[in-house]
Image (tube, rainbow, N blue to C red):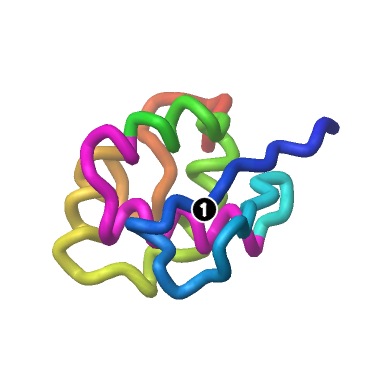
Amino acid sequence: MSKMKIPAKKRLFWYLKDGQEFDLDNPCHADMYVQQLLSQGRVEDIREMLRVLSPESFLASFRRIKKYLPKEVRKFWEDGLGSADGYPKGNPHLS
């Protein structure tokens, strides 16, 4: 598996050292990235995240971090994914 590293945008990750990167193959890094983007990201940040992460990686991360999201954000994404457990309805490849 190749290393998927992306720089941490200072606008979103102001609390990290300059030059910090996320290794999205690392579940802890992916979870921090997804949680911050879902909570604080702009539309273009979310689009980039969904291009960079595979659907499987995004859903796995979402299931791990959803309890830490603000209630409104969590509900929005659960509704959008079609299920409160983070598994999309009707797609056996992702559930």
| Residue, far left | 72
Q: Of 23 and 87, which appears nearest the observer?
A: 23
Query: Is 19 contained in the magenta span?
Result: no
Q: Place residue 31 in its image quadrant.
A: bottom right
Reading the image, the residue beneath label 1 is: 8
Residue 16: image x %, image y %? 52, 70
Q: Of 54 and 95, which appears nearest the observer?
A: 54
Residue 3: image x %, image y %? 78, 38
User: Residue at position x 64%, y 63% from top?
Assistant: 28
Q: Which residues are magenta?
A: 28-46
Say left or right for 19 vs 83: right
In the image, residue 71 sits, relative to residue 4, either above or below, namely below
Total numbered labels placed on residues in the image: 1
| Amino acid of disc 1 | Ala
| Residue, far right | 1
User: Residue at position x 28%, y 60% from top?
Assistant: 39
Q: Place residue 43 in its image quadrant.
A: top left
Residue 42: image x %, image y %? 23, 44
User: Residue at position x 36%, y 58% from top?
Assistant: 12
Q: What crowding class fits label 1: few (fewer than 14 Cα within 10 Å), some (14-19), or many (20 or more)?
A: some
Say left or right for 40 vs 72: right
In the image, residue 72 sits, relative to residue 87, either above or below, namely below
User: Residue at position x 57%, y 30% from top?
Assistant: 54
Q: Secondary structure at mark 1?
A: loop
Instruction: Considering the whole magenta stretch, tell me its main secondary structure.
Output: helix
Q: Of 87 and 71, which appears nearest the observer?
A: 71
Location of the N terminus (image quadrant): top right
Say left or right for 72 vs 26: left
Q: Of 31 and 17, which appears nearest the observer?
A: 17
Query: Is 33 contained in the magenta span?
Result: yes
Say left or right for 4 vs 57: right
